[in-house]
Amino acid sequence: MDKKQTRDCPICGYNKSLNTFPYITNFNNINFYYLKCGRCFSVFVNQIPNKETFALMYAKDVYHDCDYDAEIGGTYQESVQLLQSYAHSGTTVLDYGCGLGAFLKELSANDFIPFGVEFDVDAADFASKNSSCEVWTVDDFYSLSTNKRFDIIHLGDVLEHLPEPTNTINEILEKLKPGGILFVEGPLEINPSPVYWSIMIFGWIKRILRPRFVANDPPHHLFRVDAPQQLAFFSNYIGTDLNLEYWRVYETGWPYAGGSIIKRIISSIAILIGGKCLFGAEFGNRFQAIFTKK
């Protein structure tokens, strides 16, 4: 059976899709294809990584220590300042997918009461020690008492890692108090941006010159969306009623910001027009959203 045509879209559930950029990668001896949904046009990975592959992808020493080492000494001041506009100190905050605990530390420094959840056991232990906060593994989190609820739930760069995002978000929202805040931020990987367009052009050229090329990168991001798709996900596919309180699209220039001169120029142009509406589209490669639970 052709693996490229066997999975429904994880965003809208549509069952027709076509192979698209970045096409295919092989990790842990498994081929992962990239498909574009024929209805909502999001790009997603097929097939879903199995439990063993997830463990390899997100082990602390090969994922957090390599990609998020700066979190140990870094801060999330801007994100916490935004949150302070909608919530007062002393409220409980669950950081689902807390990484190495940097956001937890910033929350504590601003008098919030933070808790964390992380997939990898070693990462959860490190985050707890690094932030001096209680951090659960995913399994431990879902075994918590049904009476345990939080004033705020934060997901920072988490959605794109979820194999079944709709089901997971609905489960997480059961832990959010009525009237509570859902604060989400993350990438918009197929949103209009000079960086995205450049990556696509180079990808198409590579595809023409090397049609049988197979990458070997772990499929960390299981789906890729633009701004309208991301907003529609929360508006149309989440079972819990949410009110949108804040929405922002902006640009970081990633991954070109630290590249060659040409890449840095492209990145600078992208940052300059990030957040602006041009030709009917809002430019940028990241978003922040705040919702309240009805």
Image (spheres, rainbow, N blue to C red):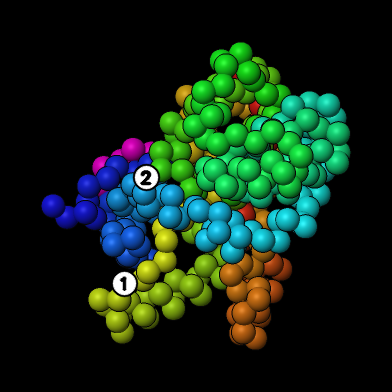
Kind of residue at badge 1 = Val
Q: Quadrant of residue 136?
A: top right
Residue 98 higher or lower than 44, as above or below: above
The location of residue 169, given as percent across then percent down, is 51, 32
Instruction: Report which residue position mark 2 lands on.
Output: 51
Q: Main secondary structure of the magenta part?
A: loop
Q: Quadrant of residue 192?
A: bottom right
The location of residue 290, given as percent across then percent down, is 67, 36
The location of residue 262, given as percent across then percent down, is 61, 85
Segment colored magenta: 12-16
Kind of residue at badge 2 = Lys
The location of residue 127, given as percent across then percent down, is 67, 45
Residue placed furthest toward the top: 147
Dot in front, 2 or 1: 2
Q: Write the residue at 36% across / 80% down.
A: 206
Q: How many marks?
A: 2
Q: Write the residue at 61% across / 13% down.
A: 147
Q: Can residue 39 be seen by looking at this rendering?
A: no
Which of marks 1 and 2 precedes in the sequence? 2
Q: Quadrant of the C terminus?
A: top right
Residue placed furthest toward the left: 1
